[in-house]
Image (spheres, grey):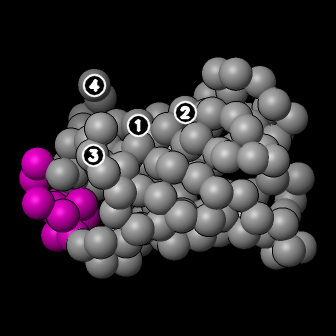
Amino acid sequence: MSMSLAKYVLVFAGVLAAAFDSTSAQASSWVGVMKSDNGKRARVTAFVNAETVQLRFGEPVNCTIDANFLDVENGTSVYRFHVSQNGGAFCDRLYPGELMVTPSSTDSLRMSFRRHLVPWWGVLERGTDR
């Protein structure tokens, strides 16, 4: 791991530690609804840790996509999407975009991303850990 990447991982860990206890920051699940600026909605379960995020979207989207940690900007962790695991037009079109994750409190996260230049966002609540 490069010195620069190590620095960002440590900063991210510090951001999470401020919002979560160290055990839950390792692998926490979060649930909620992602909304687009043009009125569309999709239920999502997110599994988040300092290195990766996995988003599992419900109907009608019905797809899963992973993202790896990239950077920290002003307390927001930035992740880069991978190619979708199980296909689906929604997740396929997220690649190679970025996911922004900001702790709102100990029990909520704000997530956002763009799909076809349309912003999507949601506040997810703490779910049951994996």
Q: Secondary structure at mark 4?
A: loop
Please say if 115 is above or below 97: below
Q: Which of disc 4 and disc 1 is earlier in sequence?
A: 4
What residue sits right under mark 2 in the picture? 66
Residue at left 24%, top 64%?
Answer: 15
Q: Which of disc 1 and disc 3 is earlier in sequence?
A: 1
Please say if 126 is above or below 69: below
Does residue 22 show up magenta in the picture?
Answer: yes
Name the kind of residue labelled 1 in the image: Thr
Rendering quarter of residue 55: top right
What residue sits right under mark 3 in the picture? 129
**Residue 114 showing in the rendered view:** yes
| Disc 3 residue crowd, few under 14, some 14–19, many 20+, Cα 10 Å | few
x and y percentages locating residue 35 in the rendered image:
72, 69
What residue sits right under mark 4 in the picture? 1
Report, in whole angstroms, how far the alpha carbon at label 2 lies from the one at label 4.
20 Å
Q: Nearer the viewer, residue 15 or 84?
A: 84
Report whether 31 appears left or right of 94: left
Report, in whole angstroms, how far the alpha carbon at label 2 lies from the one at label 1.
7 Å
| Disc 4 residue crowd, few under 14, some 14–19, many 20+, Cα 10 Å | few
Residue at left 18%, top 64%?
Answer: 20
The reply to whether the C-beta atoms of the residues labelled 2 and 4 are less than 8 Å apart is no
The reply to whether the C-beta atoms of the residues labelled 3 and 1 are less than 8 Å apart is no
x and y percentages locating residue 33 in the rendered image:
62, 65
Q: Which of disc 2 and disc 3 is earlier in sequence?
A: 2
Report, in whole angstroms, how far the alpha carbon at label 1 lies from the one at label 4.
15 Å
x and y percentages locating residue 5 in the rendered image:
33, 38
The quarter in which the N terminus is drawn is: top left
Does residue 122 show up magenta in the picture?
Answer: no
The quarter in which the C terminus is drawn is: top left
What residue sits right under mark 1 in the picture? 52
Name the kind of residue labelled 4 in the image: Met
